[in-house]
Image (tube, rainbow, N blue to C red):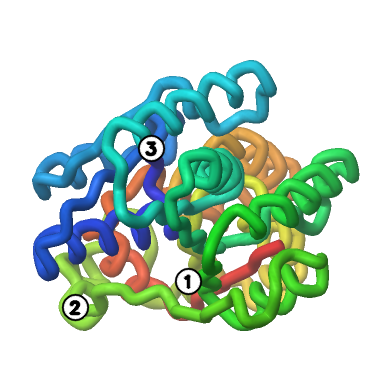
């Protein structure tokens, strides 16, 4: 369970259900591997019932995915929950299938489309067809925005009355009262008050749209030489991005923070003048 928006949304919901409403909630996830960091420690520190299935991997692998499906089904069969709430693409498909086979009510939340711009057509087609099937295996679908609902309906996934939009809530206290001052953060990154900082907060991963910002950087720097770019987060594409920035001759204009704990992100946002939310 890596550190990411969908994962934080899920963990915070489980945390509230457990502590505010005293629901008996079990969170089933795969191992949090990779440079993005993991939310497992937060979940365990909060006393949540966290069950990590080593079979549930991020990459597509038919044999491994079959093992993951069986592991999920085994957990659900032994626990017999009243409702199964699934998230993400692959885990959401496997989880809904397991719930359907066990005749358990299921709800699925769409945090981002499984099929997307730039995806190779076999995967795009396979995910779209799989989502069509999986929509029939659940009772309701929650979407984090209306645009996501329209995208899925246009792809023939589910029925209009099957969807409800629930925007992702977040704790804004850290942004109102950041743990570090703007000056402290800038000094730690060798940035001055005169610098105009354009920042982006996201995993260095596919679909996050960092390349749009990087490719636009030469024209921006040419027009405004005092601009600096701050990329908050880590991920598997860091080396690729750094190589491209070096190729463009803009290494001095970019700062990479690496992995930042979620409770520290607000300080970096306060150090920015402009937030760029590029995405595919």
Task: In the rendered structure, find residue 245 and report the number of the disc placed on it.
Answer: none
Quadrant (top left, top right, bottom left, bottom right) of the N terminus: top left
Q: Where residue 60 appears, x then y in whole percent?
A: 66, 29
Q: Where residue 195 appears, x then y in whole percent?
A: 46, 72
> Residue beneath label 3, please?
29
Residue 263 in sight here: yes
CB atoms at circles 3 and 2 under 8 Å apart? no
Q: Residue furthest front?
A: 103
Dot 2 or dot 1: first in sequence order is 2
Which residue appears at 48% of the width and 28% of the height?
A: 56
Height in image: 20 above or below 136?
below
Nearer the viewer's eye, disc 3 or disc 2? 3
Dot 3 or dot 2: first in sequence order is 3
CB atoms at circles 2 and 1 under 8 Å apart? no
Q: Within 10 angstroms of label 1, few (less than 14), some, or many (20 or more) residues?
A: many
Q: Secondary structure at mark 3?
A: strand
Left or right: 146 in relation to 15? right
Dot 3 or dot 1: first in sequence order is 3
> Residue beneath label 2, please?
173
> Residue beneath label 1, please?
197
Distance from disc 3 to disc 2, alpha carbons, whole Å, reads 28 Å
Distance from disc 2 to disc 1, alpha carbons, whole Å, reads 23 Å
Q: Where residue 121 appears, x then y in whole percent?
A: 90, 45
């Amino acid at each position: 369970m890596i550190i990411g928006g969908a994962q934080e949304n899920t963990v915070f919901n489980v945390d509230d259900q457990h502590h505010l409403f005293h629901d008996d909630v079990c969170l089933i996830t795969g191992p949090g591997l990779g440079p993005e960091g993991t939310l497992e420690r937060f979940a365990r520190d909060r006393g949540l019932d966290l069950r990590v299935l080593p079979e549930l991997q991020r990459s597509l692998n038919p044999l491994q995915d079959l093992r993951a499906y069986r592991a999920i089904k085994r957990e659900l069969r032994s626990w017999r929950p009243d409702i199964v709430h699934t998230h993400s693409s692959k885990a959401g498909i496997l989880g809904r299938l397991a719930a359907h086979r066990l005749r358990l009510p299921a709800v699925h939340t769409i945090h981002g489309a499984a099929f997307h711009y730039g995806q190779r057509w076999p995967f795009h087609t396979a995910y779209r067809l799989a989502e069509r099937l999986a929509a029939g295996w659940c009772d309701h679908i929650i979407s984090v925005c209306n645009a996501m609902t329209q995208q899925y309906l246009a792809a023939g996934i589910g029925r209009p009355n099957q969807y409800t939009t629930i925007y992702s809530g977040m704790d804004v206290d850290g942004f109102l009262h950041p743990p570090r001052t703007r000056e402290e953060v800038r000094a730690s990154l060798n940035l001055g008050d005169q610098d105009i900082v354009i920042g982006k907060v996201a995993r260095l991963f596919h679909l996050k749209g960092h390349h749009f910002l990087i490719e636009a950087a030469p024209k921006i720097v040419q027009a405004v030489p005092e601009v600096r770019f701050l990329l908050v987060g880590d991920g598997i594409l860091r080396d690729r991005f750094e190589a491209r920035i070096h190729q463009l001759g803009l290494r001095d204009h970019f700062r990479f923070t690496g992995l930042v704990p979620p409770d520290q992100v607000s300080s970096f946002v306060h150090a920015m003048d402009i937030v760029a939310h590029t995405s595919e």
